Amino acid sequence: MAALLVLITQGTPAYGSLSIEGALSLAALGILSTALAFTLYFWLVGAAGSVYASLVTYVVPVFGLLLGWAVLGEEIGPGTALGAVLITGGVAVMMYGPAAQEWLARAAGQLRGPALADAPVLIDKEEYA
């Protein structure tokens, strides 16, 4: 739809006026950045499942922030850093949450002793299965 709107308002682009460098850049953008990224993303969906694959989209702004800092020398404010930590923490909880819950339950079971043997665990696995 957007491409049609551009064609109507701006006319056809003058691809003949592209330099070799510009044409190669356009081809690299289309092939490497788009086709390779789509291929890797759909491979990830097949290998890890849609929930884990969708977590990749949350980490993209964090990597953009870090690349802007490392390459362009952009400053990272405290609020932005806190947001990056929250995003990364949320993704980590989604990816490793069940394993962390099992580890905490085992650790709590070792600490309980006989007096607290009947105390409830953090989350009952059957309840969320």
Image: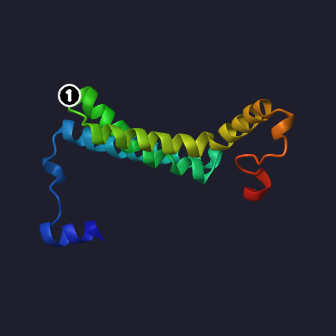
The residue furthest right is: 114
In front of the other: 119 or 89: 119
The image's colour scheme reads rainbow
> Left or right: 107 with respect to 57?
right
In front of the other: 63 or 78: 78
Position in image of residue 49 (x %, y %)? 63, 50
> Left or right: 116 with respect to 39?
right
User: Quarter of the image holding residue 80?
Assistant: top left
Dot 1: element: loop
Instruction: Classify 50 as above or below 65.
Output: below
User: Quarter of the image holding residue 7?
Assistant: bottom left
Position in image of residue 77 (x %, y %)? 24, 37
Instruction: Classify 94 as above or below 73.
Output: below
Quarter of the image for the N terminus: give it: bottom left
Q: Is residue 40 visible?
A: no
In front of the other: 122 or 66: 122
> Left or right: 116 with respect to 11?
right
Q: How many marks?
A: 1
In front of the other: 32 or 125: 125
User: Quarter of the image holding residue 13?
Assistant: bottom left
> Left or right: 67 with respect to 115?
left
Label 1 crowd (10 A; few <14 / some 14-19 / many >=20): few
Position in image of residue 25 (x %, y %)? 26, 39
Instruction: Classify 23 as above or below 68.
Output: below
Residue position marked by numbered label 1 in the rendering: 73
Task: Please report the residue visible at 51 percent of the width from the left and 44 percent of the height from the top.
Answer: 91
Task: Please report the residue visible at 71 percent of the width from the left and 34 percent of the height from the top.
Answer: 103
Quarter of the image for the C terminus: give it: bottom right
Position in image of residue 11 (x %, y %)? 14, 67
Amino acid type assigned to the residue bearing label 1 in the image: Gly
Task: Please report the residue visible at 63 percent of the width from the left and 45 percent of the height from the top.
Answer: 48
